[in-house]
Amino acid sequence: MSEDQESGAELSRRQFLRRTAVAGAVVTVGLGASLPVAAAAAVPQDTPSTFFSTVSIEESGTYAAPGSDGDLWANCWADDDSTYAANGDGRGFSDQPFKDIVMNRIDGTPESGLSGVKLAEADQIGTVWGDPTQYNRKPTGMVCVDGVLYVAVQDLKSGANAFDDVPNASISRSDDHGRTWQKTSQPMFTDHRFTTIFFLDFGKDSRNAGYALGPLDAGFVYAYGLDWNWRDSNTNTVPDPVDVYLARVPRHAVQQRSQWEFFTGTRNHRPTWSRKIQDKVAVLHDPTRRFTQPLPGKSGDLTVISQGGVLYNRPLDRYIYTSWTDPTFEFYESPTPWGPWKRFLSHDFGLVEWYEMGDRTHTPKNGGYATTIPSKYVSHDGQLMWVQSNWWKAPVPTPEANYNFNLRRLRVTPYRPTIPVNHPNSHDNLARSGADVTPIQVSAHYAHSSYYNDGDRTRSEDSYDGAVKSLDFWGYAFSRSYRMNRLVYTTGTMFPDGGWFASGPRVQVRQNFDWVDVRHLRITPDYPHSSSAGANVPYTISFETTWGDGVRVVGQPGGASTFTSIAELEVYLDN
């Protein structure tokens, strides 16, 4: 029986039972009392997700769609098999004049090649509701449902305190695949509430909604929203977003503000809704800040909740929210649209200078903003995704600077419990034993995480990222468990302001997602905790035989800039 032939009632029952079995263990307390999911989401966000065993993201965009110009690129996969994307501040897929918003159609895939065409621009798409001398338009989300395209457009501050105020938003509709747009006569969302909107992406023409939610709940379009601003307020003129809210609206009434209802919690493991926006509660609350102690001359203290996207990954049966801080990517996963959400990736690109494609001195490296995962490009097993993000480098962006429709690979491996079965072999470096090895570190300054896993003890990477760090590590995550009892850590380059461990290094293994110190650790030769550790010096670290699906050397980084360096990290199981 195909998914289209499956009984709607049975599909709804099966999906409901499966999802509540996962969510219920987290949100139910006492004698059957149900906490709002907002309370469940308040579990410390440093609690790791246990859904993936390995996660890797490329350090820079690796595929830029030819002829594209602009940023943001809110997108959706439509019924005609094309991807539609709205860019801000650029020319879109054209050589025409710069506009604050442009609508585009994109065909192909990253593997086959992408091509695009501009369809509409500026006033043809949306309205600036505020003072046009103080605000301009920015696209924040797109969705296709029943062959109809919708784009969310917000007023974003320009001029003084630019990018730090979002008072209004609305949604425009296209019935002819992006050529013409029907705008609302007034803003749908005002007073800074729910004014950064991005839709839940259920794949081609939203067809996975029925599979994920069942026919009853699939009759709605779902959207996430932020209050006040689209990301951290750099000028602190408005509150920083720390909450993500969820709303839904019947498919036929997306532009009717009175039909919208907002998530207010759960009752008996089912979501509850209210049409009063003041009743809304967060599905994700995360007050975490990154780079709270930047080095002199660097700025930081950035909140992690920002305009991004939420994808339903059908092969993995998981919802993925992609957020960012410019110097970091912050990705979360959940079994339901309303949580509980847990972070599965925090990738540090550093407060240091981002390196462009075509830079002959460095390996390309850049973070970015407005992160989304276009659903058309997800692999059949769901484990390879392409993240779209942008960055801009003054004074003028160029194609090498990633100011375009730009993609990078995200690879994940779902966690499955395994029993370590490897046998002692003092010559078998587990770090080079196969494709299931993923290097992990606080930060790779030059985007050379592969260096300490290539067998070459002469090439060096370091963890300088412009921040004061109290903890640093280098290691690996594996897709299965291994036994081990010896590492060989080869230092990298020593610098006047860092490159060594000030304390440690000690060794930890990952067991059931907890990092556990090994026992009876011995380092040969003695590690000096200063620059006299030397460059490209191997240190053998032996310990009692243990097991894990991850291993790392960890300690306090040394020097005025608090970073360490590495050339190679080998992992062995000796007799």
Image: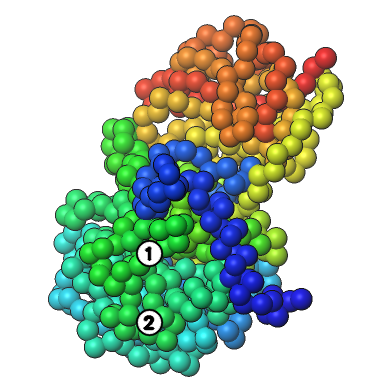
Decide: few, some or many residues near mark 1? Use Cα within 10 Å; few <14, some 14-19, many ≥20.
some
Check the picture and name the quadrant holding the N terminus: bottom right
- Check disc 2 and report the residue beneath it: 254
Q: Quadrant of residue 387?
A: bottom right
Judge depth for marks 2 and 1 and give the one in front: 1
Q: Is residue 298 left or right of residue 331?
A: left
The residue lying at 22 percent from left, 84 percent from top is 186
Specify the amino acid type for callout 2.
Val
Indicate whether 161 appears above or below 2.
above
The residue lying at 66 percent from left, 56 percent from top is 383
Q: CA distance from mark 2 to mark 1?
A: 19 Å
Q: Nearer the viewer, residue 254 or 56?
A: 254
Mark 2 vs 1: CB contact within 8 A: no
Specify the amino acid type for callout 1.
Thr
Point out residue 251 in the picture as x, y percentages from the top left corner: 44, 82
Indicate whether 209 appears above or below 43.
below
Q: Is residue 504 left or right of residue 377?
A: left
Q: Judge whether residue 31 can be spotted in this image.
A: yes
Labels 2 and 1: the sequence-earlier one: 2
The residue lying at 60 percent from left, 67 percent from top is 13
Indicate whether 506 appears above or below 125.
above
Point out residue 379 in the picture as x, y percentages from the top left corner: 67, 63
Point out residue 348 in the picture as x, y percentages from the top left corner: 46, 42
Task: Name the element at disc 1.
Answer: strand
Q: Nearer the viewer, residue 177 or 98?
A: 177
Point out residue 298 in the picture as x, y percentages from the top left corner: 31, 39
Q: Residue 272 has which mark?
A: 1
- Residue found at the very far front of the displayed protein: 31
